[in-house]
Image: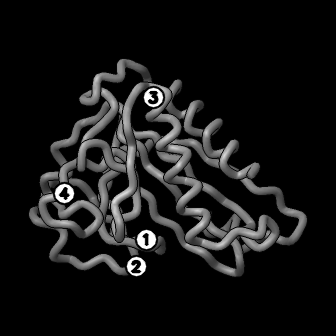
Amino acid sequence: MQRFTAGRDTATPDELWLTEHPPVFTQGQAGRPEHLLRDTGIPVVKIDRGGQITYHGPGQVVVYLLLDLTRRGLKVRELVTRIEQAVIDLLAGHGLFGERLPGAPGVYVGGAKVAALGLRVKGGCCYHGVALNVDMELEPYSAINPCGYPGMKVTQLRDLGVETDWARVGEALLEQLERQLEQ
C-alpha cells in the first residue's frame, strides 16, 4: 500500500484490495502499548494508519481503499462516513441495524463493534481501510482494548444470525463501497 501510494501520479487508477489476514494485532500511529492487555503470542505490528490497536484474523473481511482523494474531491471525514455507510447498507441487506457512535469510527450493532476502520492520508491519497467481522475467532479481542476503548464489545455477522461466507460478504462489501464512492 505504501509503495503503491508513493508511486501514484494523477493518472494512477484507484484500487480496492480485498483480503483476509492471519492472526495479527495492528497498532496505529497513535497506538499506546497499554491497550495490549496481555501477550497471547499473536504478533503486534506497528503500522502507519490512524487509530489504536485492533485485531485481524481469518474470517474477517478487510478492504484496503487506495484512493486519490484530491481527484475525487473527498475530504477524510466524508470518506469515513461513506465507508461506514457502505457497511451499514450491507448490514441492512441482512436485516441488521448498523450505526455510528460519536467519536468512535466504525460500525456498531447493539453497541458492539462489527466493523473497524483506519486510514492514512499522504499527498492527497489514502490507504488502509475497513475490517468487517464475518465468522472469526473473537477471543483475541479480549487481549486488547479494541481501538483504544476499554471494555468495548465486539461482534460478528455469524453471532448476529447471518449465515454466509467470507467471499460473499467480501464481494458485497466491495459493491457497497463502490456504490458509495460513485456518489
Which of disc 1 and disc 2 is earlier in sequence?
2
The amino acid type of the residue labelled 3 equals Trp
Q: Which residue is mark 2?
A: 29
Q: Nearer the viewer, residue 138 or 43?
A: 138
Q: In terms of secondary structure, where does tag 1 sit?
A: loop
Dot 2: element: loop
State how far apart marks 4 and 1 are (Cα).
22 Å
20 sits left or right of 151 in the view: right
Q: Give the number of the mark in front: 2 or 1.
A: 2
Q: Which residue is mark 3?
A: 166
Percent of width and height locating residue 175: 65, 36
Indicate which disc residue 152 carries.
Answer: 4
**Earlier along the polypeptide chain: callout 4 or callout 1?**
1
- Total numbered labels placed on residues in the image: 4
Circles 1 and 3 in contact, beta carbons < 8 Å: no
Identify which amino acid the numbered label 4 is placed on.
Met
Give whichever of discs 3 and 4 has the lower sequence position: 4
Mark 1 burial class by Cα count in 10 Å: few <14, some 14-19, many 20+: some
Q: What type is the residue that disc 2 sits on?
A: Gln
Q: Residue flagged by tag 1: what amino acid is it?
A: Ile
Given contact means CB atoms under 8 Å apart, are the residues at marks 2 and 1 in contact? yes
Residue 136, quarter of the rendered image: top left
Q: Which mark is residue 47?
A: 1
User: Percent position (x, y) of residue 133?
Assistant: 36, 40
- What is the quadrant of residue 10 in the picture? bottom right
Q: Which secondary structure, mark 3?
A: helix
In the image, taking residue 15 as reference, residue 159 lies left or right, namely: left
